[in-house]
């Protein structure tokens, strides 16, 4: 069985999908151990299910190789299914689901008014690790 991150707790204040009554996040050492085992199990891709949405994440890393993330673009419908609410972005939008170096999960939002405009980062939403199942 693959190592899982769904037993980790994100200690940040605003996290979608976290159970009520948490008393802080998982400690750094536990996160590091889980991160090392999950990263070593996956080469260039990682298949996950996030709140019932199947995703194939691609591995990206820094030049030094110390910072490794897994990410995938998601649709507006997938965004709504994962988080349980619609995006408030008007115009053209793009979403990126990311599992970061310390196994924290987030969805970044990008938008532009039309094809002539540049993409702008419109914030991110933290996603509770308990919603992520590594396949």
Image (tube, helix red, strand yellow):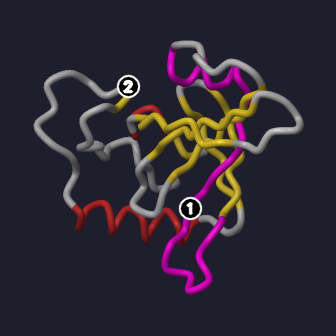
Q: Which residues are magenta?
A: 60-84
Residue at point 51% right, 37% down?
A: 123
Determine whether 123 is above or below 61 in the image. above
* Residue wearing tag 2: 17
Q: Where does the image place residue 82, in percent across and percent down from the top left? A: 55, 24
Residue 44 as seen in the image, left or right of residue 124: right
Q: Secondary structure at mark 1?
A: strand
**Contact flag, marks 1 and 2 (Cβ < 8 Å):** no
Determine whether 47 is above or below 38 in the image. above
Residue at point 58% right, 16% down?
A: 88
Say if the magenta span includes residue 66. yes
Alpha-carbon neighbours of circle 1 within 10 Å: few (<14), some, or many (≥20)? some
* Residue wearing tag 1: 69
Residue 24's quadrant in the figure?
Answer: top left
1 or 83, nearer to the observer: 83
Label disc, if present, on residue 101 of the rendered structure: none
Determine whether 76 is above or below 101 in the image. above
Say if the magenta span includes residue 72. yes
Residue 13 as seen in the image, left or right of residue 126: left
| Residue at far top of view | 85
Q: Where does the image place residue 69, in percent across and percent down from the top left? A: 56, 61
């Amino acid at each position: 069985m693959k190592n899982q991150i769904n037993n980790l707790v994100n200690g940040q204040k605003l996290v979608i999908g976290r159970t009520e009554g948490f008393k802080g996040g998982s400690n750094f050492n536990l996160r590091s151990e889980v991160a090392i085992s999950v990263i070593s199990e996956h080469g260039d891709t990682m298949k996950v299910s996030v709140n019932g949405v199947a995703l194939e994440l691609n591995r990206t890393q820094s030049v030094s190789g110390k910072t490794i993330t897994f990410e995938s673009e998601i649709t507006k419908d997938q965004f709504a299914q994962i988080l349980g609410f619609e995006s408030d972005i008007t115009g053209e939008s793009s979403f990126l689901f990311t599992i970061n170096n310390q196994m924290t999960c987030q969805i970044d939002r990008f938008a532009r008014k039309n094809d002539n405009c540049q993409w702008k980062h419109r914030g991110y939403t933290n996603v509770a690790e308990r919603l992520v199942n590594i396949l």
